[in-house]
Image: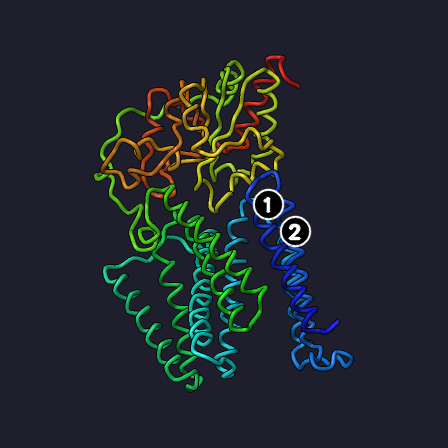
Amino acid sequence: MNAALLIDSSYFIAAFLFIYGLKRMSSPLTARSGIIVAGWGMVLAVLASFLYTLDVNDAAKPHLTTNIALALIALALGLGWAWRSGKKVAMTEMPQMVALYNGMGGGAAAAIAAIELIGYKTHGTVALSLAVLGGLIGAVALSGSLIAWAKLDGRINGTLRFGALQLVNGSLLLILLAIGGYIIWHGGAVAWPLFAVFFALALFYGVMMTMPIGGADMPVVISLYNAFTGLAVGFEGYVLNNPALMIAGMVVGSAGSLLTLLMAKAMNRSVANVLFSNFGAASDEAEGDIAGSQKPIDAGDAGINMRYASKVIIAPGYGLAVAQAQHKLFELVKLLQDADVEVKFAIHPVAGRMPGHMNVLLAEAGVPYDIIFDMEDINDEFKEADVAIVIGANDTVNPAARTNKSSPIYGMPVLNVDMAKQVYVVKRGQGKGYSGVENALFYADNTQMVYGDAQKVIVNMIQAIKSLGGGH
């Protein structure tokens, strides 16, 4: 078979596997197989790239390119690092891993752009423009994702905010666009130091764009940089005339863009508001005084009350992942189900530190998909629940978002936890959430606080229920 035909056929099959795999990822029931299918598509695309080492005009005389050894070394290093990190990463560190992988994809796209531009390999205004744009977006995704990783991992605490921040960032973007336009105008035939300045400023812009963003917005930021990476890869695929890169990049870019918009909508905010506002910086006075007090209860008493309830709805959050309590929580759920208690999970779109974080966490523990519900599918059921238990969630269950117009989170759709007959909140202490907003739910008449590490609290609940003689 002609090498060119073999390459095109491989890329066509790889593209089909990408799209089919993404389709299967849309449902928790088929997500795992979708990842595997898309993974095989990537394996095929990588193997097909090595077919370029065949002389298309004389396929009988294969020859190695000068970069084949470096490509194999890079492939081995990448596979080794991904395999090792993927195997050992804790569920609490999954958002950090996703941020790093996003950054590596963006960095790869930026590297392709740099090689094409500095080597004057790009021909045509369209290809040159996409190389410049892909390089800019890829570099921003790289540095921005690294900052997001550092924030999520606790290596960078706080945010960088000052009066002229938006002016500085706006000026940086204009300078980058001006340099990019200059490169395109001159057909890429400019001195290499200008390319160095362009990519250095793009990396710096990614840092400056991400540093002001608070931790509560990290799920949206990670999704946004995922979209950036996809777009950059798609643009560079066009530059290289590589269909697999184009299709994979555009699929990831469009999916990431849609997810970003949906998550911003779930927070009742625009993407621009996430990127450029000082969310969570509001003063306590702006939120207003909250009546009532936090009322503690023993974990065992709370567990016994759930044992005699008819319906319990669980609202998990990042604290569940931090405590690594998902397996014990499922043990508690099974005890309650053995006692004929109806148990359901309510998942907010931005619960955790990345899109779908809670779904992945519960799936790891073996929680059946048919008792896990998205917010819009279960919110009306809270008023029918005898008990709602909040584990490690905060802003996503704050009723002030519905009632307090002075609250920074006003208008954000939240779980209707406060409408349950009895609410238990499992929390380490009396601190505020990641957004810095006080939670009115914790002071409600029907809410009691179960203070302590989530895993220890749930263990005490399990012991209390077993002491009644029910369950096994």
Q: Which residue occupies 22% across, 34% down?
A: 288
What's the CA distance linking mark 1 and mark 2? 9 Å
Question: Which amino acid is tagged 1?
Answer: Arg
Disc on res. 37: 2
Sequence-wise, the earlier of marks 1 and 2 is: 1
Question: In the shown orientation, is residue 272 left or right of residue 111?
Answer: left
Residue 470 appears at what percent x and percent y? 62, 14
Q: Quadrant of residue 286?
A: top left
Question: In the shown orientation, is residue 50 left or right of residue 277?
Answer: right
Q: Quadrant of residue 125?
A: bottom left
Residue 32 appears at what percent x and percent y? 63, 44
Relative depth, front residue between 224 and 77: 224
Please say if 397 is above or below 357: above
Task: Report the quarter where the C terminus lies.
Answer: top right
SS category of the residue bearing label 1 = helix
Specify few, some or many for label 2: CA neighbours under 10 Å numbering under 14, 14-19, or 20 or more: many
Q: Can the viewer see residue 344?
A: yes
Relative depth, front residue between 31 and 19: 19
Q: Which residue occupies 63% across, 62% down?
A: 12
SS category of the residue bearing label 2 = helix
- Marks 1 and 2: CB-CB under 8 Å? yes
Question: Which amino acid is tagged 2?
Answer: Val
Please say if 138 is above or below 263: below
How many numbered markers are drawn? 2
Give the farthest residue toward the right: 60
Relative depth, front residue between 420 and 294: 420
Q: Can the viewer see residue 322?
A: no
Question: In the shown orientation, is residue 80 left or right of residue 393?
Answer: right
Task: Report the quarter where the N terminus lies.
Answer: bottom right
Q: Which residue occupies 52% across, 70% down?
A: 238
What residue is shown with label 1? 24
